[in-house]
Image (tube, coloured by chain):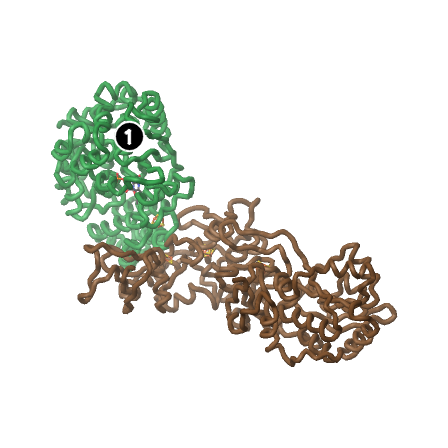
Chain colours: A brown, B green
Amino acid sequence: MPFIKIDDHEIEVDAGRRVLDIATELGIKIPHYCYHQALSSPANCRMCLVEQVGAPKLMPSCATRVFPAPPNRKTTIDGKEYDAVFYTASPVVKEAQESIMEFLLINHPLDCPWCDQAGECRLQDYSYEYGKGHSRYKEEKRTFPKKKLGPNVLLYTNRCIMCTRCIRFCEEITGTDELMVSERGGKAQIDIYSEDKPLDNPLATCVTDICPVGALVSQDFLYKPRVWNYTRKESVCGMCASNCNISVDTKQNLIYRIKPRENQQVNSFWMCDNGRLGYNRWQNDVDRLETPMVRRNGHLEPVSWEEAYDAIKNGLKSFRNTEIAGIASPYSTNEENYLFQKLMANAFKSDQISYATGATWEAWEAKKSPFKISEFKSPNYFGAKDVIGNRHKGEIIEKISKIQVKALYWVGGNLDQRLTDGERDALQKLQFLVVQDVWLSPITEYANVVLPATNYYEKEGTFTNASHILQWVHPVVNLMDDMKPEWLIFIELAKRLGGSLGYTDIKNVTRDMLANTPAYKHIKPADIGSQGIQTRR
Amino acid sequence: MQNGNGKVPASIPYMRSVYAGDEAVLLKHYNPPESLTLKHYQQHGGYRALKKAFSMEQDAVIEEVKAANLRGRGGAGFPAGLKWSFMPKESDKPSVLVCNADESEPGTFKDRALMNGVPHMLLEGMIIAAYAMRASLSYIYIRGEMVHEAQCLENAIAEAYAANLLGKNILGSGYDLEMAVHRGAGAYICGEETGLLESLEGKRGWPRTKPPFPAQYGAFGYPTTVNNVETLACVPHIINNGAAWFKSLGPEQSPGPKLYCVSGHVKKPGLYEFPMGINMKTLIYDHCGGMLHDDRKLKAVIPGGSSVPVITADEVDVAMDFNSLSAVGSMLGSAGMIVMDESVCMVDALLNLEKFYAHESCGQCTPCREGTPWLRKILTRIEHGQATMDDIDLLQDVADKIEKRTICPLGDAAAWPVQGMLKKFRHEFEEHVKLGRCPINSRL
Ligand SMILES: Cc1cc2nc3c(=O)[nH]c(=O)nc-3n(C[C@H](O)[C@H](O)[C@H](O)COP(=O)(O)O)c2cc1C
Ligand code: SF4
Ligand code: SF4
Ligand code: SF4
Ligand code: FES
């Protein structure tokens, strides 16, 4: 193992590691633009130059790897022998950083006041830390037109520093190869190869995350309030069973932007555009159910929670327990499904519970990295299977058709709920139907009682993804006034029906859910952590 | 050697004058179109060296080239034998030899003469080099504009295949080698060896960061050596005549026959062959007929292609080899010698060069992409009398900040002429500022 020195740190490291990575781990900050951990290192920005003792010039720390030096090529400092010695903040290094900043800024438009990146821009940050503060450039700045690279991504060409992260993303992660450089020298600019092949692969907007400056911007986020005005919360995406880690920027209980959060086991640094932009549908297009409803004279009418609970109690009274069944949801958390199961068992004495599959469509896999968009468009299909047991809703539908089951509690959550003809026929035969859903759907048409359900931006608990990794889900927005978290609905309803589940809040539910789910029983809540835990051993 | 024989090939539009005496080695039999043929080459001893090489161990060939101290003629003067020894002796991937025939350095026109005059000499050198390095693939990457030369090479390769000098089991030696010509699209940067490799792979000619070096990771990821045309053309002569003979031509530190490209204000510009180390003054005044206009004095010479620092008239009594020119703060480079008389404005000359670098910068790395157009813009202002004294310092500083901080040496190549001019001719820059105009160029 090479023994090296970086500034005042002496360290033994694995051969072949990059100086920049080693320094970062040691807490030494080396400014850099073009290097990104998930991508190759062309060393083109030259911002990360460091001094290597004995080298004829400054070395790019992002592309310089350390190896054991042959005996005659060791570096001796103060009588001590090293395989390599680096200085990251010596006068020459500082002077180089200053000059790179000057070069990068001579043609930069300096339009920070209306740039979407302002506040999270490396050019801004580094100018402050490593720059000179004034420019010696007296010439006219070069200007380029701005371009729409694809449906979701704009290029403010003048702001680009040609780090090529975006190109490498399309080459090395998605493998879709939409981006290239056109022209050369000072005229070089990012572009698409052809109008026929715009930047619209499923991960396209990720280029705006990795662009170190404000050149690539998300059409969705364009000119929204300045970034420092937001509250940022962390959770996981619920738009498919991949459960990408996200951070969500909100203001006044509205979501303004969702960005991926690093989780090397789950989504690396990425997320898909569907997941990123999906919140718009919830905020703009969906007429959410906000209060409980009860069917009176053929119409669903808003009622209070008390009235709704009573309607359920009265409606189910006359059935034998074998005539009552439940369908749990792949849109619910593991905790919600666990409580639902308990509710069915304790209050209705029914063990007839199954799960629905939720929406599915074609999966998509990145060509050059393990990133995958799951074919399951619900967040917790795999968790539902683990918690409920391998019992699909088909069994129950069949029993309803045969009029063996007469009353049903269906937890929905699917924005694109569809029913098969068989399911419609079955639902028509039901004598009593409780539906918990996010909006009026094909199932609520048959409902006697409807309870408003929550979506994955509002939930608290855990999801289990397609790779069986169980992760925390946190609410990023507050529920609307009359709504209740679904775990609370189950607790209150059980109590009303005389079969208390023994919980007053959600804290202990996770613990018991884990302990009582065969696939999870070896896991403690504290094991889950910020990166989740693999449930399969 | 007397002034050359001035052979003027009728069929080749751009090769005005090739001067090579009877003692010449590389251009001795330069006489296109006859000298293009395999028959002509063989009549003058061609492919004898190849047979000799096949009778030697591969490593012995490398040792011979090392002993001859053949230094790369592409510009940097890196010892060829040493470079070849970096190639793996055993590899699960094929090894590759690439001949760099991109020749686009302003003032340089030597490789094209070898290609349009004696292409089989290059081919023989390549086959020997490839054999020594155990390469099974070889390419000639030729500048796109050189259409005629590419055709000469294609013909020569076809002849060589037909004569079993290429292909399988060459001359019964058991050694296989394929060879192909790859035409570039006309970018200076594709002469830089890693830019060349990218271009050869069909990509944009963006130089790679080194390490890894081509011998570890070259064309298509295979171990690769890149050598200049003239370097490779020397190889058959070393094998035929031995390292000792080669070293006896010119100074021991940089020996061998050498092609000098002379352009500018001399009476007989052209391509000259001499043993390495010819005195520059002798070359200009004895061989090139002296200054073009008898009433104008010599002012400056750029000795090694546009990238190298300029030297003044007082410094021309110097041997033209790698070490001697380094000693006066310049370089032999590509031996593209640009002679300038007193009618030339040094600011304008430098502006002309910097326009070239700004235009040819690939745009990949920050200092060169941003710095070269900046140099051009500052120089434009100085030349047009719109600059201050501070701008001269700024010019120097920008060049200093490009140098040594880029991915490839094009950045350095843009910086060195600025540094050289300011060192030797700073007073001319100051004069422009003081007068508010160019003192020489009347058109301004
Ligand atoms: C910008 C640039 C352009 C170059 N152009 C050429 C060229 O046209 N021909 C050439 O042989 N070498 C050129 N070189 C040098 C090559 O990178 C390389 O060093 C050379 O081909 C090695 O061959 P040699 O060792 O035989 O000299 C260039 C270098 C740079 C930096
Ligand atoms: S658009 Fe952004 S990511 Fe792409 S090269 Fe320019 S600065 Fe880099
Ligand atoms: S892949 Fe799935 S979890 Fe990830 S962002 Fe897209 S929809 Fe969300
Ligand atoms: S120095 Fe210039 S030519 Fe070389 S890689 Fe950098 S930008 Fe390209
Ligand atoms: S981060 Fe190292 S050169 Fe760009």
| Quadrant of the rendered image containing residue B334 | top left
Residue drawn at x 12%, y 38% as measured from the top left: B251
Which residue is at a point 16% across and 24% down the rendered structure image?
B22
Observer-nearest of A70 and B188? A70
In this rendered view, identify the residue nearer to me: B41 or B316. Answer: B41
User: x, y percentage for residue A141?
Assistant: 42, 56
How packed mark 1 is, by other alpha carbons closer than 10 Å (few <14, some 14-19, many 20 or more), is many
The chain that hosts pointer 1 is B
* Figure quadrant, ligand 3: bottom right
Instruction: Note whether residue B77 is visible.
Output: no
- Using the rendered view, name the quadrant where residue A330 is placed: bottom right
The answer to whether A223 appears left or right of A350 in the picture is left
The residue at 84%/73% (across/down) is A318
- Disc 1 residue type? Ile
Left or right: A173 with respect to B194?
A: right
- How far from the left and from the top, in percent, is residue B424? 19, 50
Q: Nearer the viewer, residue A330 or A521?
A: A521
Question: Where A188 sits versus A213, above or below?
Answer: above
Q: Is residue B373 visible?
A: yes
Side (left or right) of B318 relative to A10: left
Q: Nearer the viewer, residue A363 or B332?
A: A363
Corner quadrant of residue A416: bottom right
Percent position of residue B411, x then y = 31, 50
Dot 1 lies on which element?
A: helix
B273 relative to A223, above or below: above
| Figure quadrant of the N terminus of chain A | bottom left
Residue A494's spot in the image, x, y percent?
A: 72, 77
Vertical order, B264 against A366 (above or below) = above
* Disc 1: which residue: B127
